[in-house]
Amino acid sequence: MPATVFSCRWFALCALLLLGGCQPDQPAPPLDQQLYIWQRQWRPAHEQALSASRADFSTLRVLALQAQPKAGWSRARVDLAQLKADGRPVIAVIRLDGQLPALDLDRARAQISQLLADWRAGGVMPTGVEIDHDSGSARLSGYTDFLIKLRGLLPPSLKLSITALPAWLDSPQLPALLQAVDSSVLQVHAVSNPRLGLFNPGQPRDWAERWGRVSDKAFYLALPAYGIAVLPDDGGAPVVESEVALNRGGERRELLADPQQLATLARQLRAKPPAHLAGLIWFRLPLPGDRRAWSLSTLSAVARGEALASQWQVQLSARDGLYDIRLDNLGNLDRPLPARVELNAEQCDGVDGLSGYTLRQTPKQLIFTRQSSARIAAGGQRALGWARCTRIDQGAWNVYP
C-alpha cells in the first residue's frame, strides 16, 4: 500500500474519531412522573381526580396497609373498582411505623399476601410493593435482613422498593440495604424538625447526587405538593396537623411547599439528572377541598415543566342594582388570598363582605380586607361580597398582595 494512501486513510479515521468525540451528549430521557395516593378513606371524588391526573402521571403508589405500635395492622379503604378502571400501573405502599419496637416478618408476610390476594380478586394487579419504614440508621442492618427475607417470600414478578431517608447516606449499611431491593424512593420532604420547615430546596439535589453514587439501581425522588400545620407543643415534640384536623386548640403555623421552588428543582433535575435517577413521585394526589395540597392544575403544570403564572380578575354580576363580586385566579398557579381588593363604586346603600373578607365603603370605593388566610386554587374563584350600588366600574379595581 502506498504511504500516501495509508496517510489519507489514517487522517480520515482520526477525523471521524475526533468528530465523534465532539458530538453533543444524547439528551437524557425525560424523568418519569408518578403520584402517591395517601388518603386512608377513598371517596367518590377520587374518580374525578384520577381521571384529571392520568395524562401527566404514569404510575400510582397507593397507601394500602399500615402497622402502628398500638393500633396494630390496618388497611386503607381503597376503592378497587376506581383503581381498576383507572388502568395505570399500581404499587401498593405498606407503611411500617418507625416507632415499631421490631419488624415481625411472619405477620408482615401474612398481611401483605392477603392484601395482594384481595386486590387481585378485585381486579387490581399491583406491579410492585413499596415498604415505607422510617428506620433509624442504627437499625438498618436488621431492616436489611427483613427486606432480604421478605423479597424471598414475594412473587418474583413483583418488584420490591422502599422509601428511604437522606440520613441513611451516612450509614455504611446503606449499600447492602439498597442491594436488597429493586429500587428506592428517596424522600426529601418532612425529613427535618417541622419547626425548620417542610422542605429545604438547597438540599435535595446534593442528596440525590450522593444517592446515585451509592447504588447502581434506579431510584426516585419523593417531592412535596402539600402543606402541614405546626401546633403549639408546650416544649415537647412538635405536633403536626396534615390531612386530618386534630381536636386541639392553639394557633396553627401553616407550612406549604412552594410550587416555584419545586418547579425550579424539577427543571434542574431534568436538565442534568443525577446518576440512576429514574423519576419524580409527587406527594400527594389532591382532592377537591384539600386545603393543604396544591391544586391538580398547579401540580400538573410543575410536572410538565410549564412556566407558572397567575393573574387576578375581579368579576361582577349585576341584577337590579345588586352586584355579586368575586375574585378569579387565572392561570396555573395557586395563590394566597390577597390582603386587599379595591373597586371604584358610586352611591352604594348596602354592602357586605363574604368568605373571610370584610367590606368598607367610602364615597368613591369599596374596600375588601382579608380577615383569614387561605388560597385560591389555579383556575378557581372566591366570593368577595355583595353591594347595592348605582354603579360599579368593572375595569377600575386593584388587588394588593
Image (cartoon, rainbow, N blue to C red):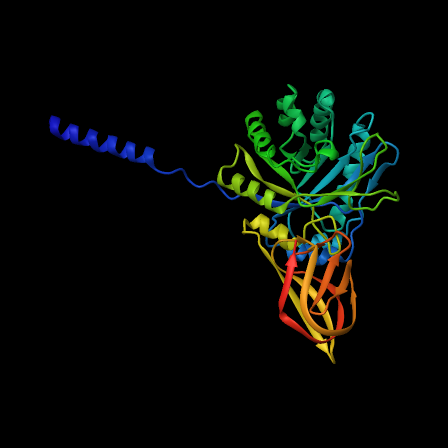
How many callouts does the rendering have?
A: 0
Position of residue 307 in the picture relative to residue 147 (left or right): left
The quarter of the displayed image where residue 340 is located: bottom right
The answer to which of 126 and 152 lies nearer the viewer is 126
Position of residue 304 in the picture relative to residue 316 (left or right): left
Q: Position of residue 386 (x, y in %)?
A: 76, 69
Position of residue 248 in the picture relative to residue 296 (left or right): right
The answer to which of 44 and 253 lies nearer the viewer is 253
Image vertical order of residue 179 relative to residue 80, above or below: above
Q: Position of residue 209 (x, y in %)?
A: 55, 30
Q: Residue furthest bottom?
A: 320
Q: Position of residue 264 (x, y in %)?
A: 55, 43
The quarter of the displayed image where residue 227 is located: top right
Q: Please report the residue visible at 77 percent of the width from the left and 47 percent of the height from the top.
A: 39
The answer to which of 269 and 90 lies nearer the viewer is 269
Q: Please report the residue visible at 12 percent of the width from the left and 26 percent of the height from the top.
A: 3
Image vertical order of residue 346 relative to residue 115, above or below: below
Q: Position of residue 76 (x, y in %)?
A: 80, 45
Q: Residue furthest front?
A: 363
Position of residue 233 in the picture relative to residue 270 (left or right): right
Q: Please report the residue visible at 56 percent of the width from the left and 38 percent of the height from the top.
A: 278
Quadrant in the picture for the N terminus: top left
The answer to which of 335 and 259 lies nearer the viewer is 335
